Amino acid sequence: MDTTSGNDHSSEPATQVKSVAAGILGEFFDALEGEDGLADVSAGLRKMVLDDGVFAELAIRAAMFLDAS
């Protein structure tokens, strides 16, 4: 039984999942940006998560609570 014929696009689902996740997160950041006082937080989170690919809890907390030290 040959099972390799259906695996020609093995990297394709990961790309689709990443683009779906990026779309959902992008919509979340858009909504967050529309809230009073959260535009700066949204911009920082968007850059960190979508552009830089950082999902570390400490980095996300630092971006969310700008005045915390």
Image: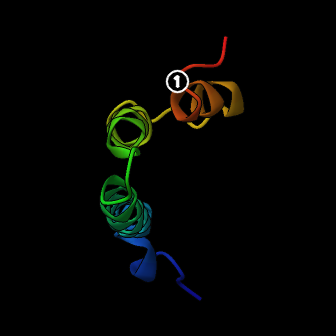
Query: Does 7 sit left or right of 64 as displayed?
Result: left
- The residue shown at (41%, 63%) is 28
Q: For label 1, count other residues whose C-alpha is less than 10 Å away and answer few (under 14), some (14-19) or many (20+).
A: few
* Residue highlighted by disc 1: 66
In the image, farthest residue toward the bottom: 1
- The residue shown at (37%, 53%) is 36
Q: Can you tell which quarter of the image residue 8 is in?
A: bottom left
Residue 60: percent from left, percent from top: 59, 33
Residue 15: percent from left, percent from top: 35, 60
Number of callouts in the render?
Answer: 1
Residue 29: percent from left, percent from top: 37, 56
Query: Does 39 sit left or right of 66 as displayed?
Result: left
51 vs 37: above or below = above
Amino acid found under the numbered disc labelled 1? Leu
Q: Can you tell which quarter of the image residue 53 is in?
A: top left
Instruction: Quarter of the image for the N terminus: give it.
Output: bottom right
